[in-house]
Image (tube, rainbow, N blue to C red):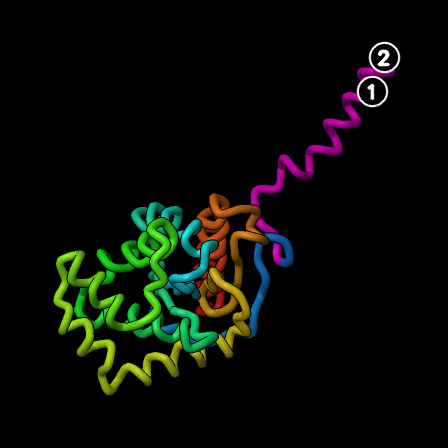
Amino acid sequence: MRALIRLSLFALLLLPLAGRAEFLEGVEYTRVIQQPVETGKKIEVREFFWYGCPHCFSLEPILEKWLKTLPKNAQFVRTPAVFSERWAVHARAYYAFDAVGITTKMHPAMFYTMHVEKRPMSDADSIAALVADKGGNRQAFLDAYNSFGMQASLNHATQLAHDYNINSVPTLIVDGKYMTNANIAGGYDKVPKVLEFLIKKAASERSAAKK
């Protein structure tokens, strides 16, 4: 009888954990000072990343898989963090990929080259060579990399990181007000579930604000 009572008490203690379907603020995500979003009616999911970051590399395939099922009311936006000149080189590369329409091919290629092949990709020429190796136009990439408007993109990325108080990557911001990452989410594989929860939460809050 005592063993049965102890088992029942143990089960009762587990109920709050088993029954918790939602994620908690201050546990799996935190609130940040709200900033304007750039995705209009869609919920913005913004990732701050750096190609040289091993944690970004680990999260990338999980995000890529999740993006295939991204909720229709959400839009994913990448923002390269610019914490040093080396990071700025990679930020320029990302924006140049985007400008010439080769992000889908070159974004994973940069991660693979740096983290699997262990090539630093530390200057425009080495990245341009990779672009050519992957079938892209080397000169078009370099023209975009060195374009007049590139500094504006870097300034914007730097300002966003400052506004959101970003001090590590990868960091994800949902709808300009909720932050999560793999550490607080409970692991890389938990990040998509937390993002989906926050997208629903943000959408609900937007609908309530209209009433």
Which residue does the image show at 83% across and 16% down from the upper left?
Answer: 3
Which residue does the image show at 82% across and 22% down from the upper left?
Answer: 6
Towards the viewer: 162 or 44: 162
Q: In this view, does 143 lie to the left or right of 151?
A: left
Please tell me the numbered disc located at residue 185. Answer: none
The residue pinned by badge 2 equals 1
Q: State the extent of the magenta-drawn residues as a range.
A: 1-25
Which residue does the image show at 14% across and 73% down from the upper left?
Answer: 140
Query: Where on the picture, by quarter, is residue 139?
Result: bottom left
Classify the position of the N terminus by image quarter. Answer: top right
Residue type at tag 1 = Ile
Q: Does residue 17 sit above or below 138 in this rendering? A: above
**CA separation in Å, label 1 and label 2:** 6 Å
Crowd class of label 2 (few under 14; some 14 to 19; many from 20; radius 10 Å):
few
Q: Is residue 125 left or right of residue 201?
A: left
Check contact, mark 1 vs mark 2: CB within 8 A: yes
Towards the viewer: 83 or 20: 83
Magenta span: helix, strand or loop, mainly? helix
Crowd class of label 1 (few under 14; some 14 to 19; many from 20; radius 10 Å):
few
The residue pinned by badge 1 equals 5
Give the tally of numbered discs.
2
Residue type at tag 2 = Met
Q: Does residue 65 sit above or below 109 in this rendering? A: above
Q: Magenta stretch containing residue 138, yes or no?
A: no
How far across and how far down the image is residue 20, in percent?
A: 61, 41
Q: Which residue lies furthest to the top in this view?
A: 1
Q: Residue furthest bottom?
A: 148
Q: Does residue 47 sit above or below 140 in this rendering? A: above
How far across and how far down the image is residue 165, in percent?
A: 55, 74
